[in-house]
Amino acid sequence: MEWMTAENVIAVGTALVGVLVTLAVVWIDRFSPQRKRLGFRVQLNTPLHREENQDSEVMTVREGQVVGMAPPANGSTLVLLRIENDRELDIGSEDYGASTDPHGLKITFGTRTVQGVVATVPAGWVSIRDDLERDPKLGRHESAVLVPKVALERGQYFKLLVQLSGGIADRDVKIGGSLQGGSIRRNRSTTPDEKPARFSPTARTVTVVLTACVVALAAVIVRDQDPPPIGCARGSLTVTGSTAFAPALRGAAKQYEEDCEGSTVTVDVHGSTAGIRELAEAGAKAGAKAGANGAKGAPAVIALSDGHKPGGFPELRENMVAVSLFTLVLHDGIPVDDLTLDQVRRIYRGEITNWKQIVPSVDQPVLLVSRDANSGTRQVFQRRVLGRNEPANSSQDCLTLDDPTSKVIRCELDSTEQVLTTVAKLPGAVGYSELRATDGRTGLHRVAVDGRRPVVEELGGSGYPYREIEYAYTWGLPPADSLTSSFLTYLRSGRGQDVISAHGHLPCATPKGLPVCGKG
């Protein structure tokens, strides 16, 4: 049926909940047999300490007369209880349950002996005082206080000040008895002077539920009337390419989906070069399909690359997004946190094969832990730091030399996570990674190059070499109303910039990023 939209279902359901709750509360309030309730609460629980050579007594005033309690001994405790009618109906003496004990309530205090008890009644409530003084009177027996069957009108209460032989926890204070047509319960502890609530629990419950229903209905109405945010687009998009930039891409995709209803942005990265090839293949397929239908087609794919794309893909359109920082990482067993650029190049040329050539006291072979050929992180390292390609792969386990003609042990791994885990595990290992991926890692540390460290705030001034621009590539110029165009704009401005900055990158389209990205 046409009316069964999500908004209408929510609206009808919310209204129904409001009506049912109101009816339920009225029924409980007017027709439920559990309408009377006697409450009690612990308002004071404090130890007493009697000074030596003093004969002072603990006293209270009732109706103008001073009533004494036993002199306090060290270790005694005073407990103040409030007994109250906290519902709408009066409680009569006949409402207390039938019992062979003439008293209405029995309050116990665990194993503590009751040394004394006095009652206080607000002025004007004479009937309560009379009930407490009428046989059987308020009394005590060992660890219990015996309370008469006191009639309490709505909102009335009285207090009991009890002196115990030792300390007691509030939870160990128990009340025994029954109330016909009602219940006896412990209430929240309050200060002695706290005023009764302005509204009854029933009124508060109905008010809260109806307010929530009104807010929910208003939200449905507002949601139905509000237009989608400017610049948003619906549909599905795949973002691929750089693994180094993947955390920022996932954060931006999640934020975009929250800001733009009806959009799905999937981040599926396998490396910069692999992403470029995936985009090119998707573009070729989309172009062939569109050509058969007599229309121009473009895939909903964006590929992120650490640096410029490889040659041979003329259809791809380039957009600068941000500057990423990378770092060399070294096993913690090697006490080196700064290498010269010349030392790094000699290590990767196989001229330095043991760390003792740099630190004489450390006799440990150099192990090169690298990324595979699809990795943009590796390509940036070769382009920006080494100025040449890395040596050939010579080990499968990153520890054993499989090629006897190789000067150095070098292995290739599929992801940054594998590189960092391996470097932290193998003594003498050195590798590289996107900067933020090393945060919180144990077993390895970052290495400066020529005394310069990877710091976003210093980009453009420090001359740190291991950095690169992140480029976003699309198949030609995407349509202005497409999700591809919308998400690309989102990455380069507004909230997308905030997400990228939060992940440790410098957005290009900012006053600080423009000159850095302009230098390439």
Image (cartoon, helix red, strand yellow):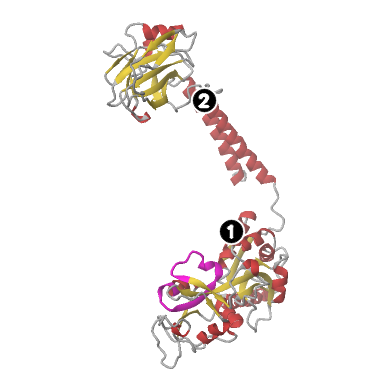
Looking at the image, the residue that sits furthest to the front is 53
Crowding near the residue tagged with mark 1, few <14, some 14–19, many ≥20 C-alpha atoms within 10 Å: some
Crowding near the residue tagged with mark 2, few <14, some 14–19, many ≥20 C-alpha atoms within 10 Å: some
* Label 2 sits on residue: 202
Q: Is residue 254 left or right of residue 394?
A: right
Question: Which residue is located at x 62 percent, y 70 percent?
Answer: 301
Q: Nearer the viewer, residue 77 or 202?
A: 77
Task: Examine the structure image and report whether residue 441 is included in the region drawn in magenta.
Answer: yes
Is 225 drawn above or below residue 37 in the view shown? below
* Label 1 sits on residue: 254
Is 348 drawn above or below residue 164 in the view shown? below
Which segment did they paint magenta? Answer: 423-444
Where is residue 252? Give x, y as percent: 61, 61
Check disc 2 and give the amino acid type: Thr
Q: Nearer the viewer, residue 6 or 508?
A: 508
Question: Which residue is located at x 55 percent, y 33 percent?
Answer: 209
Where is residue 53? Give x, y as percent: 34, 20
User: Image quarter for residue 422?
Assistant: bottom left
Alpha-carbon span between mark 1 and mark 2: 43 Å
Task: Examine the structure image and report whether residue 235 is included in the region drawn in magenta.
Answer: no
Is 433 drawn above or below residue 256 in the view shown? below
Looking at the image, the residue that sits furthest to the bottom is 405
Check disc 1 and give the amino acid type: Lys
Indicate which disc, 1 or 2, sits on the residue closer to the N terminus: 2
Pointers 1 and 2 in contact (C-beta within 8 Å): no
User: Image quarter for residue 281?
Assistant: bottom right
Answer yes or no: is residue 16 visible: yes
So how many labels did they put on this image?
2
